[in-house]
Amino acid sequence: MIAASVSGWICILIVPSARSGRKIRHRTRFVAWQPIVHRNPRISPPRARRRRPAGGGNAAAESPISARTGISGTVRRVLYRGNNGYCILKLEDDRIVVGNLLDAREGAILEGEGENVTHPKFGPQIKAHWLAERIPEEPADLLAFLSRGSVPGIGPKLAKLLVDTFGSELPTIFDRQPRRLLEINGIGEKKLLSVRRGWERLRAVRRVTAFLNRIGLGPQMAWRVYTELGENAVAILRTNPYRLTRVRGIGFERADQAAAALGLAPDAPARLAAAIEYAVEDQANRGHTVTSRPELVAQAAKLTEQPVAAVDAQLVRILTEPNPSLRETPEGLAPTSLYSAENQIAQDLSARL
């Protein structure tokens, strides 16, 4: 809610966030730049859940016994499954895997990467950096995978027709020769389009899920990220992980952690720009439509632990962009959206006088 006074009139305006268009929400926690030691910082379930089934444990109490290891196998039993995607799984070869997988289930064929650790109580296990369910190759497994609705538009009946017709070649046909699906009785152009879109979405969300796990974000964020950034989400985030701040539920702190996991330099322009945007929104949350330049630069410099001169140089670059997100006024710096909204209020009120 923004208050403005124009020609003696007092006006109240509710405006969206300067950055994302959503309603402004209060976020004030400041964090320093720190490299992430564990690539998945949420490897343990919430502290309130003290009692865990065999195979679980506190990551801090685990002792690494080897370097990174690949994960491949079929889930024999789900030992624990939390609402946030955290799970403890027992594979068919009796290995215990601890990590994040949104839809953990018995019979799922996994792929991933992690490290071997020894838990003081439960013994050897694999702490996964990322996990994903692999699309099966064997016809029977592929049939089970498709029958449970993994691909929108494909139910049990159609799944059986597809697997009976194409067998283990079906994933390749989906990817490279989708028009061959028209050989199936009941699949026309409209159904083909629906199935292709469902398959492409499955592939894209799986890529996003695996990528987010690698940078410390759980699988429950995958759909939000995919919806906001689209099928090119992974490429976008590799270029600028701070685009995560446009996703509901992800603020500067979590995006900063992801950027550190990707090896982004502490003084990277994208990081400084994101800190400036965060500082602007933080000031707006406090009810300030305009902030003095020294104050804004100082806040962003403190947030990033970078020199004031470097932050100010990045601010200059932002102000000289073709469509800058900030405007410099005699009173200070204002988000372009709020600056435009206040000018529109002034014009509307002037027209009524």
Image (cartoon, helix red, strand yellow):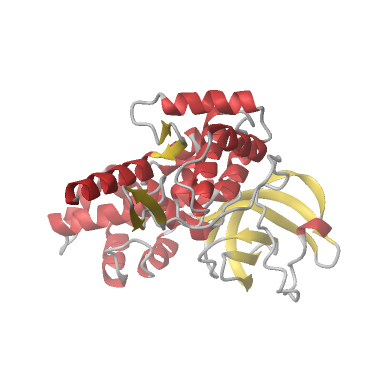
**Residue drawn at x 42%, y 52% as measured from the top left:** 205
Any part of residue 50 in sight: yes
Give the x, y percent position of residue 220. 50, 61
81 w.r.t. 172: above or below: below
- Residue nearest the observer in this picture, 131 or 26: 26
| Numbered-mark total | 0
**Residue drawn at x 50%, y 43% as measured from the top left:** 280
Q: Residue furthest right?
A: 120
16 w.r.t. 332: above or below: below
* Quarter of the figure with residue 121: bottom right
**Residue drawn at x 30%, y 67% as measured from the top left:** 160
Drawn side of residue 119 relative to residue 97, left or right? right
Drawn side of residue 17 relative to residue 278, left or right? left
- Residue nearest the observer in this picture, 128 or 29: 29
The N terminus - image quarter: bottom left
Give the x, y percent position of residue 249. 50, 57
* Quarter of the figure with residue 265: top right
Any part of residue 169 in sight: no
**Residue drawn at x 55%, y 70% as measured from the top left:** 106
Give the x, y percent position of residue 165. 27, 59
63 w.r.t. 241: above or below: below
